[in-house]
Image (spheres, rainbow, N blue to C red):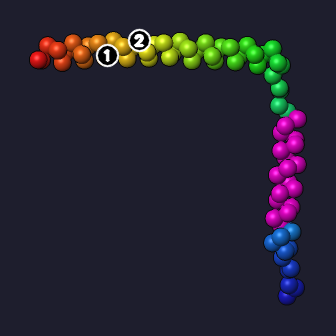
């Protein structure tokens, strides 16, 4: 019976690393990168959304604090 020699583990690991980077390069060629104009527009949209949500949270917190203070004052 012929003996099948296994590859060195280091050689197998190196082959896996090389294959990973080859596939990574292939996938990065498929990426459609945004233009600077699109990035600026999307950034402004995100900033506006953060401000709006922050304002809603601030208003809710203010109203909740006023209600809790009113309830505590009624209890005393």
State the image quarter where residue 58 is shown.
top left
- Residue depicted at x 84% and y 37%: 28
Asked whether, in this view, residue 31 is left or right of residue 54, the answer is right
Residue extending furthest left? 76
Name the mark on residue 52: none
Q: Earlier in the sequence, mark 1 or mark 2?
A: 2
Q: Where is residue 23 in the image (x, y as percent from the top left)?
A: 84, 46
> CB atoms at circles 1 and 2 under 8 Å apart?
no
Asked whether, in this view, residue 63 is left or right of residue 46, the answer is left
In-front residue for pair 57/17:
57
Residue 67, compared with residue 10, is above or below; it is above
What is the magenta range?
A: 12-29
- Residue depicted at x 25% and y 17%: 68
Screen quadrant of the N terminus: bottom right
Q: Does the magenta stretch include residue 20?
A: yes
Spatial separation of the CA atoms under disc 1 and disc 2: 8 Å
- Residue depicted at x 41% and y 11%: 59
Which residue is identified by label 1? 64
* Secondary structure that dominates the magenta span: helix
Q: Position of residue 76 (x, y in %)?
A: 11, 17
Q: Position of residue 21 (x, y in %)?
A: 85, 50
- Residue depicted at x 68% and y 14%: 44
In-front residue for pair 23/53:
53
Which residue is identified by label 2? 59
């Amino acid at each position: 019976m012929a003996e099948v020699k296994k590859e060195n583990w280091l050689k197998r690991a190196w082959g896996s690393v090389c294959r990973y980077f080859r596939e990574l390069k292939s996938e990065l060629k498929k990426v459609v990168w945004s233009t600077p104009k699109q990035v600026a527009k999307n950034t402004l949209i995100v900033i506006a959304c953060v401000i709006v949500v922050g304002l809603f949270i601030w208003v809710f917190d203010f109203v909740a604090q006023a209600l809790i203070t009113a309830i505590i004052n009624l209890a005393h």
